Amino acid sequence: MPVWLSLVGLEAPLPNLSRAGLVSHVLWGTVLGGFYEGVSRWLSWPRR
């Protein structure tokens, strides 16, 4: 993202991730991973 921002003319320092941003990304990844795991197990449930 910092490379893209610099290409459009906006200043973006590297690294461009604050502590709050890191925590929110980890939380989002955990929730999304759990949801994906639950859905994939539900879809592969043997049906008779």
Image (spheres, rainbow, N blue to C red):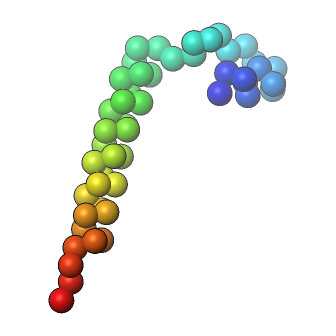
Q: Quadrant of the N terminus?
A: top right
Q: Is residue 25 above or below residue 44?
A: above
Q: Quadrant of residue 7?
A: top right
Residue most toward the left? 48
The answer to whether residue 28 is above or below residue 38 is above
Residue 30, image x, y percentages: 31, 38
Image: 15 above or below 25 = above
- Residue 3 rendering spot, x and y as whole percentages: 72, 23
**Residue at the (30%, 62%) spot, across then down:** 39
Q: With 44 as the anchor, is 10 left or right in this view?
A: right
Residue with the most extreme bottom position: 48
Front residue (pair 45, 11): 45
**Residue depicted at x 37% and y 37%:** 28
Which residue is at the front of the view, 46 or 3?
46
Quadrant for the C terminus in the image: bottom left
Q: Quadrant of residue 22?
A: top left
Question: Image quarter for residue 2?
Answer: top right
Residue 17: image x %, image y %? 51, 17
Q: Nearer the viewer, residue 22 or 40?
A: 40
Specify whether 35 is left or right of 14. left
Residue 34 point in image, percent of width and height: 28, 48
Number of disc labels:
0
Residue at x 34% of width, y 54% of height? 36
